[in-house]
Amino acid sequence: MSNKKIVKLSDSLNNNLFTFARFNRRSANKTGYSNYSYWRSTFKVFSKNKVAIYFFYMLIFLLIFTVIQPYLPGQIPPTEISIDPNTNMQLVNQPPSKTFLFGTNSIGQDLWSRIWSGTRTSLFIGILVGLWEAIIGIIIGSLWGYVRNLDRIITEIYNVFNNIPTTIVMVLLTYIMKPSIATLIFAMCITGWIGMARFIRNQIIIIRDREYNLASKTLGTSTTRIIFKNLLPYLVSVIMLRMALSIPAAIASEVFLTYIGLGLPINIPSLGNLINEGRGVMMNSSLRYQLIFPSIILSLITISFYVIGNVFADSADPKNHI
């Protein structure tokens, strides 16, 4: 077989077996591309937990209903004293009925309206205190853990605050200052950030000297960028857990202070005030509803935040992402 025939045969084989690849910029950009999304994966894992979803929707319903309840038709103001038009007497300690769904208290006020008004007050206090603890605690804890020059200064400040029991600080401030929502929030916020700051500091110390952080620092990356881009994203799951638990903890503190008589004044409905009022009549079996109803609402809110916080913290851990 001549050389010309061999060349023609090889050319025909090459044409049949191989084709020239054309350059496609869009396909080139997709090379090594992953459609992984951290938050999408987090919510996907979270949505698989039916118990957490149940408490999540229940908490959303409670929040929405608490806000819109005063605007619903037929609602009685929480401070209004109901009077019997026939006898002109106060409708005191009325059991639950169609008129008063949760009954009335010892001076004839509608417990239905007072419980939802108290829930608004307690949630307002809890959310504000929780946000304050999260923001201030994360900022101070991040600087405390990463900036070595600030470690000694912040440690001394921490020791001063930490050596004074938080309960004593709250009791003294609410005793000295005029009882109000602002006083209660201030008393909780003044020392509330300590636990979050200490926790963030310990977590950052563990990861601050890892290779990628040292490389970023060597390349001249600013401290702020390293904290917010390298360190805090690694702690999202534990931060969310602490934030979720700080809200019911603040509500519990409000209930405790009101329970011992140092919380909000009686004319401001709150879950603490309602539970304190119900405590006074709980020995009377026919009046125990005054303690049961606010306790149920408080329990639902606390359990919901606890379950959602724990499940979301697990869902936010990349190790649990598929």
Image (cartoon, rainbow, N blue to C red):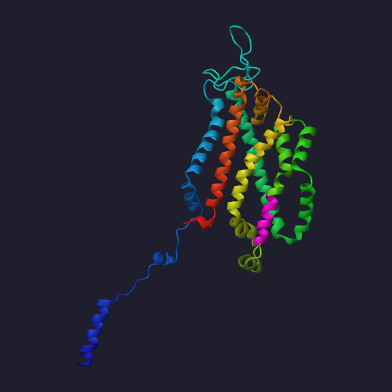
Q: Is residue 204 magenta?
A: yes
Residue 160 spot, x, y in % from top left = 80, 49
Could you tell me how many numbered marks the image carries?
Answer: 0
In front of the other: 292 or 76: 292
Residue depicted at 77% across the width and 31% down the height = 178
Quarter residue 272 falls in: top right
- Residue reaching furthest to the left: 1
- Residue reaching furthest to the bottom: 2
Residue 15 spot, x, y in % from top left = 26, 78
Residue 4 in view: yes
Residue 214 spot, x, y in % from top left = 65, 67
Residue depicted at 47% across the width and 50% down the height = 44
Quarter residue 164 falls in: top right
Residue depicted at 63% across the width and 39% down the height = 248
- Using the image, determine if residue 260 lies above or below residue 148: above
- Using residue 84 as the reference point, say whether residue 37 is left or right of it: left
* Chain part drawn in magenta: 196-206
Q: Quick one: quadrant of the N terminus?
A: bottom left
Quarter residue 130 falls in: top right
Residue 321 spot, x, y in % from top left = 49, 56
Residue 269 in view: no
Q: Is residue 147 magenta?
A: no
- Report the predominant secondary structure element of the magenta stretch: helix
Residue depicted at 78% across the width and 55% down the height = 153
- Using residue 158 as the reference point, say whether residue 217 is left or right of it: left
- Using the image, determine if residue 282 lies above or below residue 40: above
In front of the other: 277 or 147: 277
